[in-house]
Image (cartoon, rainbow, N blue to C red):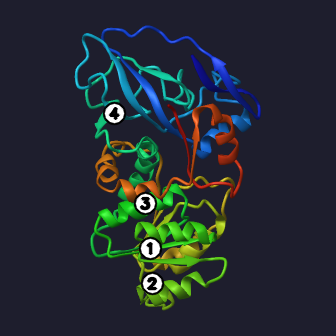
Amino acid sequence: MRSVHVTGQGTADWVEVDLPPTGPRDVLLRIRACGICGSDALYTRVGGIPPRQGATPLGHEPAAEVVEVGEETSGVEVGDHVVVDTMAFADGLLGSGGAQGALTELVLVRDHVPGRQLRVIPKDIPWHVAALNEPMAVAHHAVNRSGAAPGQRAVVFGAGPIGLGATLSLQAKGVEHVVVVDVQERRLEVAREIGADAVINSAEEDVIARLLALHGAATDALGHPGRAGSDVYIDAAGAPAVLRTALAAAKHRAVLTIPAVHAAPVDIDFGALLATEIDIRTSMGYPTEIFEVTDAIIENSEKYAKIVSHTFPADQALEALELAATPGGADKVVVVFD
């Protein structure tokens, strides 16, 4: 069968691979959709991930259909639609340096454990929406890390897929008011469509002044004014200006959670932050959230569908990778298999 692999530094292509036979405890999946992540562009740019340098299978945001089940396997049946925990494979991470990737026709789940690698979903959920499960789990983990609670006010920097997913998760947590900040008006429009309470175009507006107007004024621990009343900040953009703005706005004991990947070090004046007692937390992956977010996608599939900006047929997967790697070219790209 064919599979998309990194084939060298800066190059990816379709390659022919063999599929091992399905064992008694295995489940065979036919991939129906796979999202493109920013890390796919990174893996391609650097030439793969050792020990598969130059031969890394790509794709770790799949939705799939069960096509074969080993005789000792339970919990799924042929024909089931499933989302996948790509960090729970016996042969390594799916698509992030493991032996298999999800930009392919078939994926073998070795040593299937019921409820561990797969979650059955309703068959009326569109494949391109189901493929959001993995990145939305990343966003949901960031919200869990933030400790956001009902009645609080939150600010999300970055209206890409993770920022939009965090917005939906914050709303599900009962957060009272969610503001989304970005520099692209088309992204902010999507944030409005999924239900953000307010948006700020940071290329045109004073973010802190708007937050003061939206969330009220607050102080640091010493009573110094000029701080916004926002309780939670989420950096889903990965830009130094985001951290500078959030830290300048943060009130006493606000929480800043960072799921974004920052490409370079950022200077922070911790002396100036002492009186805020701000809690800075990083967030990576989805230790428990991979199937926690599934119910939200099932219940609000129309809202989640708005996060997908482009879909491509499988035979255009290489073009999908190229578009997703182009700055400003797309927000969320999903490859859909027939």
Q: Disc 1 and disc 3: Cα gap in Å?
A: 24 Å
User: Label 2: few (<14), some or many (≥20) within 10 Å?
Assistant: many
Q: Amino acid at mark 1?
A: Glu
Position of the N terminus by quadrant: top right
Q: Which residue is mark 2?
A: 220
Q: Is residue 20 above or below residue 31?
A: above
Confirm whether residue 258 shows in the render: no
Q: Disc 3 and disc 4: Cα gap in Å?
A: 25 Å
Q: Quadrant of residue 266?
A: bottom right
- Asked if marks 3 and 4 touch (Cβ < 8 Å), the reply is no
Q: Amino acid at mark 3?
A: Ala
Q: Is residue 107 above or below residue 40?
A: above
Furthest toward the front, the residue is 338
User: Label 4: few (<14), some or many (≥20) within 10 Å?
Assistant: many
Q: Disc 2 and disc 1: Cα gap in Å?
A: 8 Å
Residue situated in front as seen by the camera: 32 or 41: 32
Callout 1: SS? loop
- Asked if marks 1 and 3 touch (Cβ < 8 Å), the reply is no
- Report the number of discs: 4
Residue situated in front as seen by the camera: 117 or 80: 80
- Asked if marks 2 and 1 touch (Cβ < 8 Å), the reply is yes
| N-terminal-most mark, 2 or 1 | 2
**Image location (x, y in percent) of residue 118:** 33, 31
Q: Which residue is mark 1?
A: 277
Question: Which dot marks residue 166?
Answer: 3
Please state which of the two labelled residues, at mark 2 or mark 4, is closer to the viewer: 4
Question: Which dot marks residue 250?
Answer: none
Q: Which residue is mark 4?
A: 81
| N-terminal-most mark, 3 or 4 | 4
Callout 2: SS? loop
